[in-house]
Each structure stands twice: as C-alpha cells, then as structure tokens.
Image: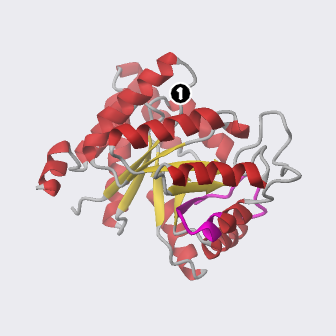
Amino acid sequence: MTRPSISFEFFPPRNLEGSFRLWDCVNTLAPLDPTFVSVTYGAGGTTRQLTHEAVGTIHKTSGLTVAAHLTCVDATRKETLAIAEGYASVGVTEIVALRGDPPKGSGGFKAHPQGFASSVDLIGALADMNRFTIRVGAYPEKHPDAANHQADIDHLKRKIEAGASSAITQFFFRPETYFRFRDACAAAGINAPIIPGILPIENWAGAKRFALACGTSVPAHLDHAFENATRDSTTDLLATAVATSLCDRLIMGGVEHLHFYTLNRPELTRDVCHALGITPKARLEKVA
C-alpha cells in the first residue's frame, strides 16, 4: 500500500491545561512528518487571538508548516487582511479560508457591515495579495445552510476559481461518501485536490453530536459497535480499527493525502498513522 502524505488540525488552547495539551499534541505528531498542520478558529471568531498566538508559536518552535484558519466572522475587511499580513510577515504563508461558524444563538451567519460577505470574497482578497497558499473547506454531504448537494459543489467551484489551491472535507464515516463527492467535483470541472478529512473517534457520543451539527450521516452499525466496545472496554481498539479501515479504503481508491482532525488528543491519530505505515522511522528514512 502506498504511504500517503498527511496533515493535522489542532485547535488553540483556552487555558493553561489546554496549552500543555496542544504542545503535547504537536510534539507527539510532528515526528510523523506532516505536510502541514492547521490551527482553527472557534465559533464566531471566539479564539481569534489565541489562534494567532498558537500559529506563531508552532511556526517558530516546531519547524512545521502551519496553515492558519481565517474566517469572515465579526471583523472588517481591513481587520481580516491585517491579520493575514501579520501572518505573512512572520513567514506563515498558508491559510485555510472559511466563512466561519456564527456565534452560538445568533440565528445564522451575518456578514459584518464592513466585512467579507462570503468565503469566496475572502479567498479572492487573499489571492490578490499573492502571498499565500489558500486551502478551503468542502462538504461531501450537504452543508446545513446549503439548498442542496449541488449547491455545495457549485460553491466549492467558485472558491477554487477565486484562488484556492485545494479543499479539505468535513469528516465522514463511509469511504463511498468521499468518492461520490470527489467524482461529482471532477464532473463539475473542479480539478484541485480534494483532501479527505478524517476524525478518529475519541468519544462516540461526542462524535455523533458533532456529526449532527454539520450534516454528517451516522451509520447505524457504528452505534452498535461502540455500544459493545464500551461494555467491553475496547473503544480505543475499535476507534483505531474504524479509522484505519476508512483510511485504507481511501488510499486504495487513489487518495494520496489524509487530513486528521486531532481534537488536540494525539494518541489515537498517531496509532492510526502507525497502522497505515506512517511512523517516525519513515520520516528519518525520508530525510536520509
């Protein structure tokens, strides 16, 4: 089996304990030689400053390529582009450009009066700066705000045409979900890489809540499997097997890059990578 390239998503710490967890996550996963790592924004831009600080620190101290999340939420165009300029000035030249989740209880996304109206507008402005590799989000299953699945594909095409070089999908549980989406994107004339997003399942109840919020369908068989694994205290083994099987089938279907949503808990992601043959030893061989 061909060994894929990989990347990881982290989220910024909210307190001292979270800081220790983030740096443990970075130190645990950095030896696996990711192509890049990304750092998220919270809903409504609530972790904006924490994201900036985490991006800067990881960039300076780890040697990793860091992609900073940047959203349209609760900021003017001038403020948002100043953030981008700040990243470029310290050598951070990859951005994951997103519309962003609205603040909880706000009733949906509302553009700032002096802000970007959509992710397409943000991507175009970043592309005009000519300083960034721009990645975007993609939904292999219908986005909760989209009229239908085709609307999602049409929107992704506009984002690629605006200047994005690749897309990272929301997580999914069935490989067929990704393959259908990839084929539909190709049929629509989208030729940029569509990177599958993988969520190793640390907590099944939490993963189901997350799936419900973002429109990801949940296979019934996983409900039964995790119920049995919880009873037998084998949830980590099951989670590793489920994620490894999903990745293996994606690789067999031609996927060359996997993006892992780590939730700042690195052990399960590391174990899945090891099961796929991605190990620190492999990184040393690459350097040699």
Residue at the front extreme of this rendering: 89
Residue at image point 81% right, 59% down: 117
Residue at image point 46% right, 61% down: 195
232 part of magenta stretch: no
> Badge 1: how crowded within 10 Å, few (<14), some, or many (20+)?
some
Q: Is residue 177 above or below residue 264?
A: below
In terms of image quadrants, where is residue 147?
Answer: bottom right
Q: Is residue 9 above or below residue 113?
A: above
The image position of residue 231, as x and y in percent, is: 41, 20
Name the one closer to the observer, 241 or 200: 200
Kind of residue at disc 1:
Pro
Badge 1 element: loop
The image position of residue 268, as x and y in percent, is: 35, 34
Quadrant of the image containing the N terminus:
bottom left
Image check: 4 left or right of 127? Answer: left
131 part of magenta stretch: yes
Residue that carries the numbered disc 1 in the rendered image: 13
> Is residue 284 visible in the rendered structure shown here?
yes
Residue at image point 50% right, 62% down: 178
Image check: 232 left or right of 263? Answer: left
Residue at the right extreme of this rendering: 113
The image position of residue 283, as x and y in percent, is: 19, 50
Name the one closer to the observer, 217 or 41: 41
Image check: 82 left or right of 66? Answer: right
Q: How many marks?
A: 1
State which region is magenta: 126-148
